[in-house]
Amino acid sequence: MPRTKGSKNKKVKKVVMPHVLSSHDLTMVAVPHVIQIRNNVPLPDPQHMTLSKYGFISTLQIGQSFEVATTTHDFKPSSLAPAAYQIASTVRKTTNKRFTIACRTLEGTSQHPTKVGCWRIA
């Protein structure tokens, strides 16, 4: 075919769609021998989850505070703020009461704190 002004020779790529499993294909898969299918097994009640080792934060009264330093046994200053804010959020959602905390780096840098304080402010 002769080339005309403005035309370009383009190669057309053939698009191949991956095989998509249909529900029929899924029903043809055999149950592995290590899996046992059971009928009429009651669903257990959910276990009460523990918020975290920082769960005591939910008991703070307005105006109370505490500090965590690198020397505080089993506690890390870098994990205090994320855990405290998560606990405050959970308390607000589950109890519908105002619960606001504030955490501040007292020593070290914000990226590598060596001492962090936490206050209940509302």
Image: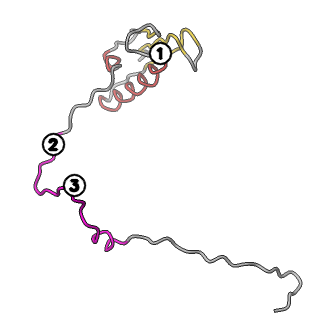
**Is 60 drawn above or below residue 37 in the view shown?**
above
Circle 1 residue: 77
Image quarter of residue 120: top left
Residue 112 point in image, percent of width and height: 56, 17
Spatial CA span between label 3 and label 1: 45 Å
Q: Residues within 10 Å of mark 2 (few under 14, many from 20)?
A: few
Q: At 41% across and 18% down in the image, what residue appears?
A: 122
Residue situated in front as seen by the camera: 116 or 59: 116
Magenta segment boundaries in residue numbering? 22-45
**Is 40 drawn above or below residue 114 in the view shown?**
below
Q: Which residue extends farthest front?
A: 33
The amino acid pointed to by label 3 is Val
Quarter occupied by the N terminus: bottom right
Q: Which mark is residue 44?
A: 2
The amino acid pointed to by label 2 is Pro
Report the number of discs: 3
